[in-house]
Image: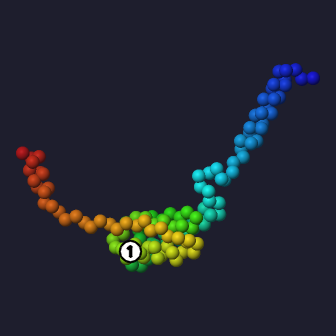
Amino acid sequence: MLNLKQFRMLQSAAAVAALLAFGGCKTSSSSSDERSEGRVVDDKQITENVQKQLKKEPVYKFDGIDVATFGGIVQLSGFVNTEDQKRRASDIARQIPGVRQVVNGIALKPEPMAPTGTTNSVQRIYSE
């Protein structure tokens, strides 16, 4: 027959074993990314293909465009010089197999600012 001390020890060991057994079970639904492993691989491949095609573009060579893909939806971001470049980047992304939608967040670069000529007056103030 077990005495009380042995019973408590056995009970504690059983509790620890149960915690270890159930604590190791983790489902993918509790992660922040609800995509399956296959979808993640597909999205990565789509991103790489879009980037490759943008760089191969003979006219524009889209080096400053970032590409991200989630669930077959491609997001483009970065800066280009013209509206035609922005439109062409979207067209290229849409042609990649597996792309369901393209979200074009590309912005046009601002026009360069003309010099104002005030730099000499600033230097004069500090040199006096």
Q: Foreground: 61 or 100?
A: 100
Q: Residue at x 17, y 63 (%)?
A: 115
For this view, does 29 lie left or right of residue 59? right
Total marks shown come to 1
Q: Position of residue 50 (x, y in %)?
A: 50, 71
Q: Which residue is mark 1?
A: 85
Determine if residue 32 is in view.
yes
Q: Position of residue 11 (x, y in %)?
A: 81, 29
Q: Residue at x 46, y 73 (%)?
A: 90
Q: Position of residue 4 (x, y in %)?
A: 85, 21
Q: Residue furthest left?
A: 128
For this view, does 109 lie left or right of residue 38? left
Q: Which quadrant of the view contains residue 113?
A: bottom left
Q: Position of residue 6 (x, y in %)?
A: 84, 23
Question: Dot 1: what SS?
Answer: helix
Determine if residue 48 is in view.
no
Q: Which quadrant of the view contains residue 118?
A: bottom left
Q: Which quadrant of the view contains residue 96?
A: bottom right
The amino acid type, in three-letter code, at marker 1 is Gln
Q: Residue furthest right?
A: 1
For this view, does 24 lie left or right of residue 91? right
Instruction: Using a 10 Å C-alpha cutoff, classify the residue at mark 1 as few (fewer than 14 neighbours), some (14 to 19) or many (20 or more).
Output: some
For this view, does 17 lie left or right of residue 112? right
Q: Residue at x 48, y 65 (%)?
A: 75
Q: Foreground: 98 or 44?
A: 98
Q: Quadrant of the N terminus?
A: top right
